Every structure is written in C-alpha cells, then in structure tokens.
Amino acid sequence: DAKTTQPTSMDCAEGRAANLPCNHSTISGNEYVYWYRQIHSQGPQYIIHGLKNNETNEMASLIITEDRKSSTLILPHATLRDTAVYYCIVRRYSGNTPLVFGKGTRLSVIA
Amino acid sequence: GAGVSQSPSNKVTEKGKDVELRCDPISGHTALYWYRQSLGQGLEFLIYFQGNSAPDKSGLPSDRFSAERTGGSVSTLTIQRTQQEDSAVYLCASGLAGGTSYEQYFGPGTRLTVT
C-alpha cells in the first residue's frame, strides 16, 4: 500500500470547517483513500473513503485531487467532540485486508 | 446494535506470565483483526482472520504471540512469557466480507501493563 504524509497537528476553532490534508503521491490506480479517526482512549472509527470522485457522508467530505496524489478531509462544522487523531490510509479495495496506520494528524478543536 | 467488545478492559501482569485477551466481534462479521498500540506509537497490525481461511500472522512480533478464533466468532489473543515491551493497548476489529466499504469496526481495546 502507498505511503501517506500528514501534518502532525492542527488546530481548528469550534464551528469552523476543519480541513485535514494528506499526501499520497505514490498511490496506484487500484488504491482507495480511507480516513479513520481515534478519539482519546477509544478504538479507531471509520469516517469515509473514496477512489477518485469527491465523497460526502453524514460525518465528513473527502476531496481527492484529479491526479489522486493528495486529498483533504473536511469536517464542515467542527465541534469539541471532533478532537481526535485523524488517519489517512491508502489501501487496495480488494477485500478485508489489514489497515496500515501512520502517525496521523492530531486535530484540536478549540472553543 | 452491539459493537465489538473486548475483555478485560485493563490487565496488569507480571513479567513472564501468560495472558489471554478476548474479542467478541460484531455478529455476522467474518473478518477479525488484532492490532496493538504502544505508548506514543501508531497502530500496528498483528493478525487477521477471514472466514475459514488460514489466518494472516505476518504482523505477530514473536512466537510468544498467538491467536485463535473459535467457531468463526470469538477470538483470543495469547501472549506467553510476557515482557515489559508487550505493554500496549490491544485492539480488536471486525469487518463484514463483501461489504461496500470494507470498513473495520474497532472495539475499545484492552490495556495491558507488564510490570
């Protein structure tokens, strides 16, 4: 699976949009971009995934660049409960393969 | 509905003792994974079960670690002759084969402390 690069940490004001970037310049054509988050003392939680089109669900939006070398996870109205470590993972969509987690981005939502 | 459960939530053991950690996956999920997260480290894959196939043990750090999954449901991770470096949070996840996203659902973890 391709490697990802994320900023170590970010701050966001409560109520504002949180934009978390991820670089995955070596992504291949059959690899998807997944986002998980881990709130303190909990197990990771799936957020969203995508291949090349932008995706949106009740939690977030995922914007993938046309060349697929980078993506941005958007939390449209961040709340204090969104404070967590966010992991961007590139993974082949070929079944239930294990996830390879990097260091992630520690997002702090500030009141 | 019920999520993935793990027991115990916390375990303190002495160096050299054996420990067993239990995972109850979501009912009907055929895929089951064990990960661990050491202090200040990222999540590290340990072992993966998929249906009746042979498990993928490629992430196990040593032969002191083993896992089994009985009846395609409950799984037990066993660590023999524990060492201090085994101290970590052990996370279990399950997934639904053939699902549209292959997402994994994680349990709350077992915090293991080896003294």
Image: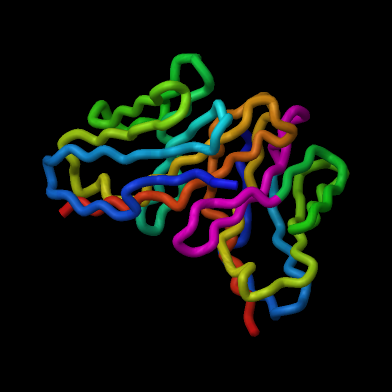
Above or below for B70 versus A40: above
Q: Between residue A66 and residue A80, name the one nearer to us.
A: A80
Above or below for A100 versus A84: above
**Colour scheme used in the picture?**
rainbow
In which quadrant will I find the C terminus of chain B? bottom left
Left or right of B104 in this view: A78:
right
Above or below for A39 versus B80: below
User: In the rendering, at what x and y percent does residue B63 appear?
Assistant: 25, 26
The picture quadrant where one finds residue A52 is top right
> Going 61% across and 68% down the picture, which residue do you hit?
A107
User: In the rendering, at what x and y percent does residue B89 appear?
Assistant: 36, 51
Task: Point out the residue furthest to the front here.
Answer: B1
> Going 45% across and 15% down the picture, which residue do you hit?
B54
> Going 60% across and 47% down the picture, which residue do you hit?
B1
Above or below for B103 versus B73: below
Q: Which residues are the magenta region?
A: A25-47
- Tell me if residue A38 is in the magenta stretch: yes
